Image (cartoon, rainbow, N blue to C red):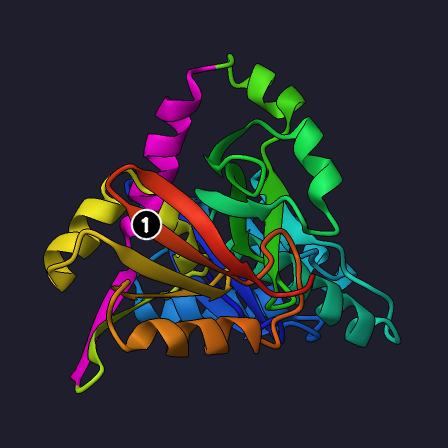
Amino acid sequence: MNTDVTQNLFAFQLNGLDEPVVASAPTVADDALRQAWAQVRAERQVQPGDVTAVYSEWEPSAEDLGFVALMFPGIRQTYSFDRPGPDGWAEAFAEAERVLAEQAAPEPELLPVLWSASSPRAEVLGAVPHHPLVPGRLSVALAHVGPTPRGTVGMHHVTTHGYQELGSPPFAELMAEAGANLKRGLRVTGHRGERGDLLHLTRENWLAASALALDDFGAQMSRNLGSERLVVGLPCPDELFVAGADSCWAEVIHEQVLGSEYDTTELVPCVVLLEPGGMRLLAERQA
């Protein structure tokens, strides 16, 4: 994809070739298409009659339209962006860059999202299918998450209406898909010291703390730490700390979570005790 809007990309479809021949010229040039065709002629032994179609990222100028009518009569022409007037290029370039950034952005992925009952946004849970992790205190829901053209994170929650549009599959099925997406890029860093062992979970693409909702989270962490009782610290949605409940890290995790400066959204920073029989909330920062 051409991301330099000051260069107009042309694609000439030629008889006998499956792929078009690409050339470029300055976007603002009135003879940009003529320049691009000169490049093609210099690189290949082709004739005007070989051309069956021309694509231009920008609408051709009147001069180039006349050139096409003379050189390639009757061919199919297409373009993506309207050509502005002489004084409109700055605005047109800015709009084209916005469109190209949207097209280049990765597709949002379905991910689990932790919700605290004490969150200022908790009333939204009534319209969002969710599963309780700590009944009445902490739940997991689903959202499509991805970057926006502005460089921020866009999150679109799977609402009850959206869930019905998906055919109302068992929540566990969607959670399994979201969990598999979450595991991609999940990074576990271990710290060993006189306080004992500590695991720190992060993820390149956000929401590492949602690993708490994975079916095998407790078993995996217990094996790594050699303890069935675990303290899990959630200072924000994008990282998670785990240590044995009887280790000296437990107090440190409490302090870090309760002192978190994260601005509350769906999740309120909290500390969870994870045991073979389930989990319960040990502490929660003020929302």
Q: Residue at x 37, y 56 (%)?
A: 21
* Quarter of the rendering occupied by the C terminus: bottom right
Residue 219 image position (x, y, % from top left): 18, 46
Q: Is residue 182 left or right of residue 118?
A: left
Q: Residue at x 28, y 57 (%)?
A: 230
Disc 1 packing (10 Å; few <14; some 14–19; many ≥20): many
The image shows residue 146 at horizontal and vertical percentages of: 52, 53
* Residue sitting nearer the eye, 248 or 211: 248
Q: Residue at x 38, y 44 (%)?
A: 279
Could you say whether the residue bearing mark 1 is in a helix, strand or loop? Answer: strand
Seen from this angle, which residue lies furthest front? Answer: 246
Q: Residue 172: within the magenta?
A: yes
Q: With respect to residue 95, does 131 lie above or below?
A: above
> Measuring 61% from the left and 54% from the top, which residue is drawn there?
154
Q: Nearer the viewer, residue 84 or 155?
A: 155
Q: Is residue 132 visible?
A: yes
Residue 209, by quadrant, is bottom left
Left or right of residue 224, residue 231 in this image? right
- Residue type, mark 1 in image: Leu
Q: Is residue 228 magenta?
A: no
Q: Which residue is mark 1?
A: 274
Look at the picture and state if 144 lies above or below 40.
above
The x and y percentages for residue 269 are: 55, 63
Q: Is residue 53 visible?
A: no
Is 248 positioned to the left or the right of 172 in the image?
left
The region drawn magenta spans 169-193
Of 26 and 30, which appears nearest the observer? 26
